[in-house]
Structure formats: structure tokens, C-alpha cells
Image (cartoon, coloured by chain):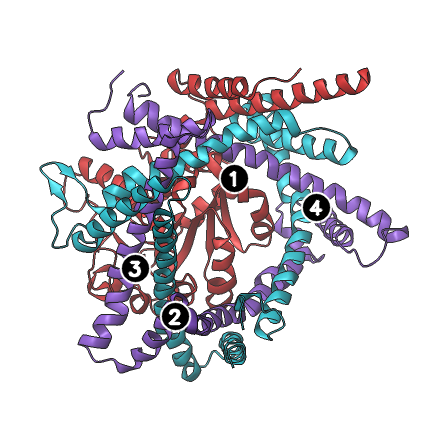
């Protein structure tokens, strides 16, 4: 029962999803819209509640058992509590019951997002440029014909895309566009077919209950 | 140099430098910044899910406007929280099954249409495709190259037969196209990564230190 | 002989920083994919609107935000009605930021009410509704049903623009700005079922992957990475004289030197590799 019910439900839900594309008639679409607009939206919200609950549980546990770097978990919990309070009571557009400004100093949820989330997230990805440069020096070795071909295409694209390419030759950017439109499309399209067939196969396996990893462990 | 006096710009800059300090080695400032990011990002998430989904789509219509049909999604959604009670944690499979089932069901015809049928249409040798290049007679040549390239690439990824004879030859041609595609992707990736660094420096040197005008 | 990674980091930092501190204007030549997107947006008629999907995360803001700003400037300057939305909650703040910046740019220099960018008349910020498939398919029937309230909490169907803009039939093009495969989902769901025209602005990482869809016409136009953003900025300024900070164009010189530096690292690394192999 603990497996049969979910497997039956996933089959029915999958069938409803496929049918929605095949029956455009309004009398069926009404039900399809209810599934999407009411059921799936609410489920996605509760899924986030689950995710947040799990995150908080992990960090509370880390603090309780004094695991490595447990002190930083306090920081996370404080940051979460403060920003959630500001957002929930201050409102999305600073229109809530909690005032989110002291004079000209604002601390509404959008301000927190712009000055904490954006800089931190963008800095994390800015690090990648350095790692890529180091990897390019250490690891990119032209050991074979294929690697030479890859490197040549990469160099042409890197130069040709930029204004420098245009100043070397007016035809270089056009040649780069040709590389992207013709041989690149041919190579990528073969991969697109493979991925698409894989996606369809996996989706069918999930709906038909052949793929059961999503059930998780246990009975 | 025109250093900013906005406290938020200073906070953003200090947090950015804390993350960038990872280049030297991992350190407590980096860890602290990481944890602050996770905390605030999740606080932001909670705000929007509450104000824009749970209240207007579920709680207000259900409890204030009397839309009783919403009891169904509410009940199924609550089952997610069964995850925290070991004895009934299997119930979490029910909302997962519904959500994932519908989504994978919708994915199948959409993928067939967009990624198989349309892509085949763009590959086959038709006069519409020849003309789509706007390159006159060269359009035929480019279409033939794409057609051959796609077939050879697919043959390269066909591992059910040994790559000998005809399949061996076509897969060797296919690898040429794949390598060109990956080379183009690598070139673009270099541009992407450098762009992200440039963006960060534009903020630090421009908005914070006022060196860039 | 191996070069310490910190020396590589320092060289890269110098090569990227110096052109920003000592800038030089590089002429940017728009390429066909960006021109096609620009033209498609330009062709939006008065009775239709365009949708700007700002589904790019803070991690890739540097590449994609200039695209959002350029498209918004284009729409506001030519008085094209524009709806802005985001498919994921962590991206909605970036959409807010881009809109606020461009609206302020225009309203600071506006002389009259007619010149100004007015919410509800010139643009509507729909906000966000999860999961992505809900707005992708739902807006084909009714935009106001999906976004019952907009980002600011207003009833969407009470906004002036939304009297005439009901669903995809009233949308000329959707410009999807993203760092993931979201544009392909727009094509798979919205374009397949409702014939919606889709234009794309993407990070350079996804650029090569999206060309098959551009070649089939599923993507009407394509802006790739910071260079694509710079090209669109160039088109907006050249065609409509919109003056504003061109963040992507400012980065072109840094990008050029950085590319040359990376190429040099690869070449030096390989020279060392071949010399070492020969010694053995």
C-alpha cells in the first residue's frame, strides 16, 4: 500500500499531463487548469515549507551536537529569522505592518536582497573565472586531433566574437557566426536528440513505475 | 576616487570580499558570508511564498471566501510535512507522486514536439530550409553539412554496435562536429566566466570605491 | 616549471581591472541573431504587448541584467507595452531592480505626464507564480487568471493595460532572459500550444546549446552573454538615441584582454607540456 498508492497516483497524474496536450477542448481544459493553477501551485508552496523545515532541522541538529563549524549555524538561523520577519511583517513591497526604514536607511526585503543576496551570489560565481584560468593553464592539453580541433574552434570563437575579431578582419565575426550556425548546430543537435530521447524514456519509466528511486528508502 | 557613503554598499562590498577571500584559502569570513547568504535567501523565499502564494491562492479563498474545493490541495500539501514524523513519513510520497507525475506527463509531448519533431524539420533537406539561411545557393551547402553532421553525430553516440566500417567512418566525422560544438561552447564559457568577474569588479571599483566612472 | 595559481589569479585580475580603470570605447557590431531579436521587439504594434521574462539568478546577473535593461529601455523609448515577470522566486528581486533603474532613468528626464513611464499604462510587473509550467500554459488562456495580483498587490485586471492584453493572442513576443533551459520550456509549452513567438537572452554558457533552436526559428532572436547585451545596447542607442550607462559595452575591452590572457595560459601550458614530453 505504501508503494502502490504513490505508484498509482503517479501513473494517473502522468496520464492527465499527457492527455492535457491531446484534448484541447475547453470542457477538459477546465480540469487541467484547476490541476495546474490550484493544486500544483499549492503543492509547490508546501514543498518549499518541507525544504525549509529540513534546512532548519539540519542546522538545529548541528548546534545541538556541536558538529564542526556549528557556530555558523547560529548565523544562518539568525539571518533567516531576521529576513523572514522583515519580509513577512514588512511586506513584499515594504507595505506591511512592520516599518522597514529608519530615516533614509531602508531595510525592507528588496533592500536585503539587493545588498546581501545579489553580492554574495555574484561573488561566488565570480570566483569561477579564476579557477577557469588556472584550469586552462594546468589541464588543457592538446594530446589528440580532437583536442586540437576543440581548441582551434574555441580560439576562433573567443577572438571572433569580440570587437577585436572585427578589427582583425570584417569576415572573422561572420565566420564565427557560420561556425555557430552550421557545424555547431549539427553537433549540438545530435546531442539534443539524444537528451530528448533520454528525457522521454525516463519520464515514461517514472510514470509507469519502472523507475522508483523517487520513492526513497524504506517500505 | 569617490568612495561610497551608502552603508548598504559597504555591507555588500565587505560580503563580496569575504567570498572572494576563498581564492587565498577557506577561512571563517567566507564561511560566515556563505551562511548569511543561505539565511537571507531563504528568508526572501518565505516572504514571497507566504504573500504571493499561500495567502492569496490558498488561505484567503479557503478560509475567508469559502472556496471549499481548495481543501483538496491543502490536505495533499500538508502531507509533505509527514516527512518529519517517521511513522507516517511514507505519506510524503503522495504529493511528490502527483507533482512529479503531472510534470513528467506534460514533459513527454512537449519534448517530442519541440526537441524532436521541430529539430528534425530543421535538419531535413527541404527548400524551406535552404532558403532559411538567406545565403542564396550556399544555403543548400549549409543545409547538407548540417544534415550530414547531425547523422554522423548520432552515429557517434550509437554504442549498440562497434564503431567499424560505415559506422566507424561516420562516427569519426561525427566527432569532428561534436568537437567543433564543444570548442564553441568552451569559447563561450570563457566569456561567461570572465563576464561574471567583470561584473563584480564593476561593482567594487565603481559603486564602492568610485574608481570607475 | 609550474606557475603558482596565485600568480595566475593576479595576472587575470590585473588584465581585467586595468581596462576598467583606464577605459577605452570599442565599437560593437551587432550580429544577425541580436538584430533579429531587436527587429522582432520593434515590430510590436500598439494593440499588443511584449513579455519580458527575467528568470536569471543573481549568480549570472553581470551577463544578463544588461540585456534586461536594454530591452526595457527599448520598450519604454518606443512606448511598447511591456509585461515583466519572473519564473522563480529568487530571481524576482532582479526584475524589480532592473525595472526600478530604467523607470527612474526615464522619469528623471521626463518633462510631462505623457513623457513619463506610468505603471499600469506603460508597463505591468506581473511578479511570480510557481511552478513555471503554471504561467507558461495558463497565460495562453488568461494572464489575469494566473497573476490575480501583480507584484505590488494590485488586482491585475484593474490595470489600464490589462483591459486589452488578455492572453498570448495579445502578445507579440516573449523575451526570455535566463541562465538555464527555461527558454526551451517556453518553446516546448507556450510556443507549441499557443504559437507564442520567443526571443532569448542567455548566458554565454548556454549560448552554443541554443543555436539549434535559433536555426529552426523556434527562437526568433538570440542574445548571448555580455557581448550579446552590448550588441543590443548598441542597437537601442543607434536606432533610438537612448542614452544610459552601457554596462556590457564598457566591459568589452576587459573581456578582450582576458580572452587573450586565457589563450596565452593555454598556449604556455601546452608548450611546457610538449617540452616536458620531449625531455622524457
**Quarter of the figure that contains the C terminus of chain B:** top left
Disc 3 and disc 2: Cα gap in Å? Answer: 20 Å
Disc 2 packing (10 Å; few <14; some 14–19; many ≥20): some
Name chain B's colour.
purple
Disc 1 and disc 2: Cα gap in Å? Answer: 42 Å
User: Which residue position holds label 1?
Assistant: C204
User: Which residue position holds label 3?
Assistant: B49
Residue plotted at (25% across, 42% down): A112
> Which one is earlier in the sequence, the residue at label 2 or at label 4?
2
Mark 3 and mark 2 in contact? Answer it, CB < 8 Å.
no
Q: Report in which chain the residue with disc 3 lies.
A: B
> Above or below — where is C256 with respect to C52?
above
User: Which residue position holds label 2?
Assistant: B82
Residue plotted at (62% across, 37% down): B184
Disc 4 packing (10 Å; few <14; some 14–19; many ≥20): some
User: Which residue position holds label 4?
Assistant: B142
Amino acid at each position: 500500500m505504501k508503494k502502490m498508492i504513490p505508484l498509482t497516483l503517479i501513473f494517473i497524474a502522468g496520464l492527465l499531463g499527457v492527455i492535457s496536450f491531446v484534448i484541447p477542448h475547453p470542457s477538459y481544459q477546465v480540469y487541467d487548469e484547476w490541476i495546474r493553477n490550484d493544486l500544483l501551485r499549492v503543492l509547490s508552496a508546501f514543498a518549499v515549507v518541507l525544504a525549509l523545515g529540513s534546512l532548519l532541522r539540519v542546522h538545529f541538529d548541528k548546534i545541538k551536537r556541536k558538529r564542526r563549524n556549528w557556530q555558523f549555524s547560529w548565523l544562518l538561523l539568525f539571518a533567516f529569522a531576521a529576513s523572514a520577519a522583515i519580509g513577512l511583517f514588512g511586506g513584499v513591497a515594504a507595505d506591511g505592518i512592520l516599518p522597514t526604514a529608519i530615516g533614509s536607511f531602508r531595510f525592507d526585503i528588496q533592500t536585503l536582497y539587493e545588498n546581501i543576496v545579489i553580492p554574495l551570489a555574484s561573488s561566488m560565481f565570480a570566483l569561477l573565472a579564476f579557477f577557469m584560468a588556472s584550469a586552462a593553464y594546468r589541464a588543457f592539453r592538446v594530446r589528440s586531433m580532437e583536442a586540437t580541433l576543440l581548441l582551434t574552434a574555441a580560439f576562433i570563437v573567443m577572438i571572433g566574437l569580440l570587437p577585436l575579431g572585427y578589427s582583425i578582419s570584417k569576415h572573422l565575426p561572420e565566420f564565427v557566426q557560420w561556425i555557430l550556425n552550421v557545424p555547431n548546430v549539427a553537433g549540438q543537435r545530435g546531442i539534443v536528440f539524444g537528451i530528448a530521447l533520454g528525457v522521454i524514456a525516463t519520464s515514461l519509466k517514472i510514470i509507469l513505475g519502472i523507475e522508483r528511486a523517487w520513492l526513497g528508502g524504506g517500505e | 576616487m569617490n568612495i561610497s557613503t551608502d552603508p548598504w554598499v559597504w555591507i555588500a562590498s565587505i560580503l563580496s570580499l569575504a567570498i572572494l577571500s576563498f581564492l587565498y584559502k577557506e577561512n571563517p569570513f567566507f564561511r560566515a558570508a556563505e551562511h548569511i547568504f543561505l539565511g537571507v535567501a531563504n528568508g526572501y523565499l518565505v516572504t514571497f511564498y507566504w504573500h504571493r502564494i499561500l495567502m492569496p491562492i490558498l488561505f484567503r479563498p479557503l478560509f475567508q471566501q469559502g472556496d471549499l474545493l481548495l481543501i483538496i490541495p491543502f490536505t495533499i500539501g500538508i502531507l509533505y510535512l509527514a516527512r518529519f514524523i517517521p511513522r507516517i513519513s511514507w505519506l510524503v510520497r503522495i504529493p511528490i507522486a502527483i507533482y512529479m507525475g503531472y510534470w513528467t506527463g506534460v514533459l513527454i509531448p512537449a519534448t517530442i514536439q519541440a526537441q524532436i519533431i521541430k529539430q528534425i524539420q530543421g535538419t531535413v533537406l527541404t527548400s524551406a530550409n535552404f532558403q532559411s539561411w538567406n545565403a542564396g545557393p550556399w544555403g543548400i551547402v549549409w543545409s547538407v553539412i548540417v544534415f550530414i553532421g547531425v547523422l554522423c553525430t548520432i552515429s557517434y553516440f550509437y554504442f549498440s554496435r562497434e564503431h567499424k566500417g560505415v559506422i566507424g567512418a561516420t562516427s569519426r566525422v561525427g566527432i569532428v562536429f561534436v568537437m567543433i560544438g564543444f570548442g564553441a561552447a568552451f569559447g563561450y564559457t570563457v566569456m561567461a566566466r570572465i563576464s561574471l568577474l567583470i561584473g563584480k569588479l564593476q561593482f567594487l571599483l565603481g559603486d564602492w570605491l568610485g574608481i570607475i566612472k | 616549471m609550474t606557475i603558482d595559481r596565485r600568480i595566475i589569479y593576479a595576472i587575470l585580475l590585473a588584465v581585467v581591472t586595468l581596462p576598467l580603470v583606464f577605459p577605452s570605447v570599442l565599437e560593437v557590431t551587432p550580429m544577425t541573431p541580436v538584430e533579429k531579436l531587436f527587429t522582432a521587439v520593434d515590430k510590436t504594434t500598439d494593440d499588443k504587448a511584449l513579455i519580458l521574462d527575467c528568470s536569471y539568478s543573481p549568480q549570472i546577473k553581470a551577463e544578463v541584467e544588461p540585456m534586461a535593461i536594454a530591452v526595457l529601455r527599448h520598450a519604454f523609448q518606443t512606448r511598447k507595452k511591456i509585461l515583466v515577470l519572473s519564473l522563480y522566486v529568487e530571481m524576482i528581486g532582479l526584475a524589480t531592480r532592473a525595472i526600478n533603474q530604467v523607470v527612474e532613468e526615464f522619469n528623471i528626464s521626463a518633462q510631462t505626464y505623457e513623457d513619463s513611464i506610468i505603471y499600469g499604462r506603460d508597463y505591468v510587473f506581473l511578479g511570480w507564480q510557481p511552478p513555471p509550467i503554471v504561467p507558461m500554459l495558463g497565460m495562453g488562456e488568461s494572464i489575469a487568471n494566473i497573476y490575480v495580483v501583480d507584484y505590488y498587490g494590485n488586482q491585475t485586471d484593474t490595470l489600464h493595460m490589462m483591459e486589452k492584453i488578455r492572453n498570448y493572442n495579445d502578445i507579440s513576443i516573449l523575451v526570455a532572459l535566463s541562465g538555464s533551459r527555461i527558454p526551451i520550456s517556453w518553446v516546448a509549452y507556450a510556443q507549441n500550444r499557443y504559437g507564442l513567438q520567443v526571443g532569448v537572452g542567455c548566458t554565454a554558457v548556454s549560448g552554443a546549446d541554443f543555436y539549434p533552436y535559433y536555426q529552426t526559428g523556434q527562437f526568433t532572436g538570440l542574445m548571448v552573454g555580455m557581448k550579446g547585451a552590448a550588441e543590443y545596447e548598441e542597437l537601442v542607442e543607434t536606432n533610438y538615441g537612448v542614452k544610459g550607462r552601457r554596462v556590457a559595452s564598457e566591459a568589452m575591452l576587459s573581456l578582450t584582454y582576458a580572452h587573450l590572457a586565457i589563450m596565452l595560459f593555454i598556449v604556455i601550458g601546452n608548450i611546457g607540456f610538449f617540452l616536458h614530453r620531449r625531455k622524457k
